Amino acid sequence: MATQKITLAKGLNMGLRKAMEDDPKVLLMGEDVGKLGGVFRITDGLQKDFGEDRVIDSPLAESGIVGTAVGMAMRGYRPVVEIQFDGFVYPAYDQIVCQVAKIHFRSQGRVKMPMVIRIPFGGGIGAVEHHSESPEAQFAHTPGLKVVACSNPVDGYWMMQQAIACDDPVIFLEPKRQYHADKAELDESATPEPLFTSRIVRAGTDLTLLAYGPTVKTAMKVAEAAATEGRSIEVIDLRTLSPLDMGPVLDSVRRTGRAVVTHEAHVNLGLGAELSARITEECFYSLEAPVLRVGGFDTPYPPSRIEEDFLPDLDRVLDAVDRSWEF
Amino acid sequence: MTQHPTGGTQSDSPGFGPDLVEVFGPSQQDGGPELIQLLTPEGERVHHPEFDQDFSAEELRGFYRDMVLTRRIDTEATALQRHGELGIWAQLLGQEAAQIGAGRALRPQDYVFPTYREHGVAWCRGVDPLRLLGLFRGVDQGGWDPAANNFALYTIVIGAQTLHATGYAMGVQRDGDVGTGDPERDTAVVAHFGDGASSQGDVNEAFIFAASYNAPVVFFCQNNQWAISEPIERQSRIPLYQRALGFGFPGVRVDGNDVLATYAVTKAALQRARDGQGPTLVEAYTYRMGAHTTTDDPTRYRLSNDVESWKLKDPIARVEVYLRRNGLADDEFLASIQAEADELGHTLREGCKSMPDPQALSMFDHVYAEETDELRAQREGYAAYLETFEGSNH
């Protein structure tokens, strides 16, 4: 099959379309996902092709979106719901944490909850408040949920289909800054890696740099810049945040002896803290330096004119790389 | 200016429409003039222009039996809690008619989303009453298979299940199981909740979704007047059934202590849903005769006078009076029901006491449909840890 160059937005859109073609039980629901195709156009054209019963414009009520999706799943559907922006997920937090996450457990496996909750996340688009947040740790901390973050168009295409096919509820984080940014070559005939796996996206020998979602691109730039200084950085795109796929991470750190984690979310009690703890527990004698974290500061997301100071960028991550060597 | 019962005042300002009706005044003490009733507290059969229907002797005796047995489940469970066999129990005393009427109006294909107090509806659905006790004993979090009886697990978070019911009903629509005219196929969904839950955002969102999509769902609100210690006045300034109008679907208030009326009204509301006419709010006006749960002490916040006046409206007594007066039940029948209740009580007592504690490692089961390596490792780690104790049995 011929390959084509697509954006992340297109990859996600194609992934949704393929999943809907493959399984008539897949439904999409969210605010403005129908005629408009979503505010980011991720569901563009899907209502036209699959009808209003399968691509459902919902009332503006996030708890209602997730709560009704629970009922649809109990009826045998596979709902994929869109939360319009990261900061709008909180009205649905109770349904996600108390209901979606627990139903399989409390029903002793009798009731499955095959739901995907799509959340455009992260900053860098100059938005007003509540439109640039990174709430992943809140969900990764909740047993019963699985949490993944895609970073590129090809993963967007495959991971979306895999998440929909998963019988567990999946929080699917999409780096909104990347939606329409870079294009990549998609080969639809390829065989994708399993969903809950992390991946080495650049091999290196001196330091392991962990990233996911929007910071993968940053991490790749860091590795390039460091290479000019003679430092070989291995970049791992985590892809799955819950469960974490620690195998490739631990293997890498045992080889490099150094690790830096970068994410846009607040550093305090973020994914970096968990990764740091696990690396320390498993690779203590391989480490040349403590695991360092570079993320958003522990402030509310700032006004957009200074968001680049809040977000981890090339220089701040390089600074952490330098500090790793200083130990 | 007129004095509002809660202490505020209202202005008589015509530009803003009519003043709030004084809904909690004397006229409301019997549920108000719009209360639908078919059997009075004194056991007199009364007629209603819209919801009247004939009941066979067998149906009436069946309602009586259901209510007596449901009450026995409740009193046994309460006693089991007092004996330390249950951690807590949510009593339904006084709400038997609301639940049996609503439960018996269902068809097999209908689906019920309960709160944690719908023991009578569970009974009607054929859920083994013993299974209800597991949650309250702490041995499981819902021991029945929802799909086996179309009866979802109890939901503790107030009102959350109304959205599940609405979504399920939206699924029913997508399956084409609405408005076909086939009585074996057309399906309705019932969301149970209470007066306290009516304040929850989820309940209001469920109303909006159901109205917007014309979903085949019946919102069955048992207004038992109390949300733990908070009276209905703290939840609503208008009768709850009137809220439906603001969401764009009909609401009715039925005497929740009248099993005939709750049955007839629920049956009609379910049929509306199955026919594709959308949601209905049924407010079953009743009273929580017991405590909120076995840990609650209602003497701290309500008058015994109120309880005494509601005792006169007991849901079971009025049916018994009607049956006897009309020669539909004799001493022998009533004694047979009593014997059946005693047998049920015995079964529950013995069954509850012999419910085994779950194995500690079972907490790792079913967290996911597709278990993660992380969790497997935790389970194995804890199992190995437990093995280090002599005589460990997990």
Image (tube, coloured by chain):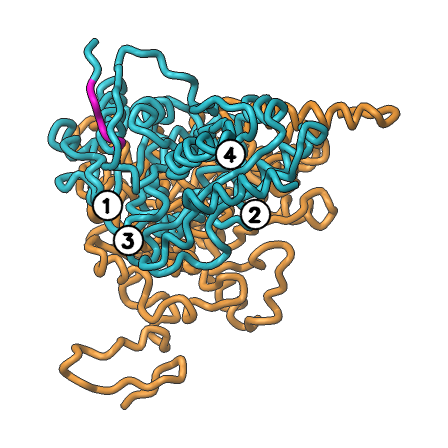
Chain colours: A cyan, B orange
**What is the chain letter for disc 2?**
A
Of pointers 3 and 4, the one earlier in the residue sequence? 3
Q: Quadrant of residue B53?
A: top left
| B312 displayed left or right of B207 | right
Please tell me whether mark 2 or mark 3 is closer to you in this view.
3
Of pointers 2 and 3, the one earlier in the residue sequence? 3
Which of these two is toward me, B191 or B184?
B191
Please tell me whether mark 2 or mark 1 is closer to you in this view.
2
Residue on which disc 3 sits: A126
Question: Magenta segment, which residues?
Answer: A4-8
**What is the chain letter for disc 4?**
A
Circle 1: element type: loop
Q: Residues within 10 Å of mark 3 (few under 14, many from 20)?
A: some
Of pointers 3 and 1, the one earlier in the residue sequence? 1
Q: Given the image, on which type of amino acid does mark 1 rest?
A: Glu
Residue on which disc 1 sits: A31
Residue on which disc 4 sits: A144
